[in-house]
Image (cartoon, coloured by chain):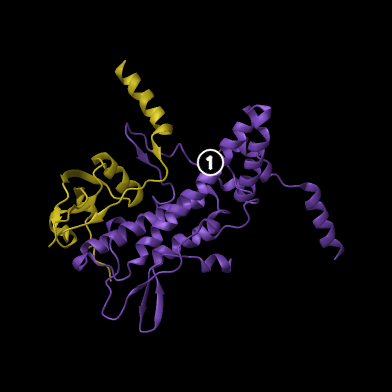
Chain colours: A purple, B yellow
Amino acid sequence: MNTLFKSINITQRVVLNSTTTFNKNSCRLYSTIVSRSSPLLNNNRLTLNRSAAETTTTTTITSNNTTNNGGGLKDFFEHVYTKGTYPVSGKSWEARDLRGKSFEDLHKLWFVLLKERNKVMTEQELAKNHKLVNPLRLKKIRKSMAAIKVVLGERDRLRKQLYILTKCPESERNQVQKEVERLTKLVGAVSLTPGLRDLEQLQDTLKVDESLESSIDNLQSTN
Amino acid sequence: MSSGIKSVANASSKYWNNVYFPNMKLAVTRQTQKTFQQDRKLMFKSDCSVGKIDVKNYLKAVYDVEVHKVNTINVQGRIKRGATKHAYKQSDYKKIIITVDPKQVEPLTRK
């Protein structure tokens, strides 16, 4: 858990008289993201509530997580920095930080970053000569959003390769199999079809090896 | 007959028109937050591809704000010329002016 907290990024900290204070809203959202244990245990949480989405004739944006946390138009504005204070940002999220996370968590993080980007861009727009105090923040947000897309892309590619594996002729089978193995190692034990329980049950990486589990239990009982 | 088609369209759009990872940029411009409490209006700068209904849905979903009215203006980027002959064009953008519900008017500056 500590290592996860180290990689919490883009939270706006105001350094004021050598004391650090966290932005409360960001921290609340991050704590929901971080409070996640092993992906094997949390398959039940991967539910995508599609029925809750609004129905209109044009595109609707589904953010089941953020509707309750929406803080109004105030979220477009940063704190006012008094003289001598400046916003500090941490490390950006990298793909290797995000690979173990479920779809739900990535979805939450996307909206946190989206709001953060709007906030920083507003600050840039309203600043004198469009100059940010800490311009690297914008780049870090962009990189983090890109990392989310990288991780989701890997999962998507694996799903497609698994489909191709069932349909491809024998001559190409080895090549596809290699690609599948590579991507399986990369993606790990994460659901490829979030919200679809029937398909999740077919996924090999999500299955628990019961003999292994029982042998671990035996070891613990003997010790 | 038409109502039947509409209901089918609504039902299908529930599944096919959802955006799970919206990537819309919105930034407040022209210091409009200072006059927000008087005229309930806020001006944003965004990409030209953004539509009025997109803005409404986006602000409802992400910021939980009901928007009554959206006005948009397309602005062409200015051509800049320096001391040399080299000239370049700034990118085009869209100005978006929203009018919110009187209940949701609040001071926008933070402590």
Q: List x then y, in percent, for residue B26.
A: 27, 52
Q: Nearer the viewer, residue A169 or A137?
A: A169
Q: Nearer the viewer, residue A216 or A157?
A: A157
Which image quadrant: the N terminus of chain A? bottom right
Instruction: Kindly state the secondary structure of the residue where label 1 is placed.
Output: helix
Give the side of residue B87 with respect to residue A133, left or right: left
Residue A69 visible in the snapshot: no
Which image quadrant: the C terminus of chain A? bottom right
Tell me what residue is drawn at x 20 percent, y 48 percent: B92
Q: List x then y, in percent, for residue A196.
A: 57, 37
Give the side of residue A6 with respect to residue A89, left or right: right
Give the residue at mark 1: A156
Count of all numbered marks drawn on residues in the image: 1
Tell me what residue is drawn at x 41 percent, y 77 percent: A20
Tell me what residue is drawn at x 16 percent, y 63 percent: B34
Q: Quadrant of residue B73?
A: top left
Look at the picture and state if A179 lies above or below A2: above
Tell me what residue is drawn at x 60 percent, y 32 percent: A163
| Amino acid type, callout 1 | Asp
Q: List x then y, in percent, for residue A179.
A: 62, 42
How dense is the environment of label 1, judged by Cα within 10 Å: few (below 14), some, or many (20 and up)? some
Callout 1: chain: A
Q: Quadrant of residue A168?
A: top right
Give the side of residue A30 with respect to residue B42, left or right: right
Look at the picture and state if A159 lies above or below A36: above
Q: Quadrant of residue A86?
A: bottom left
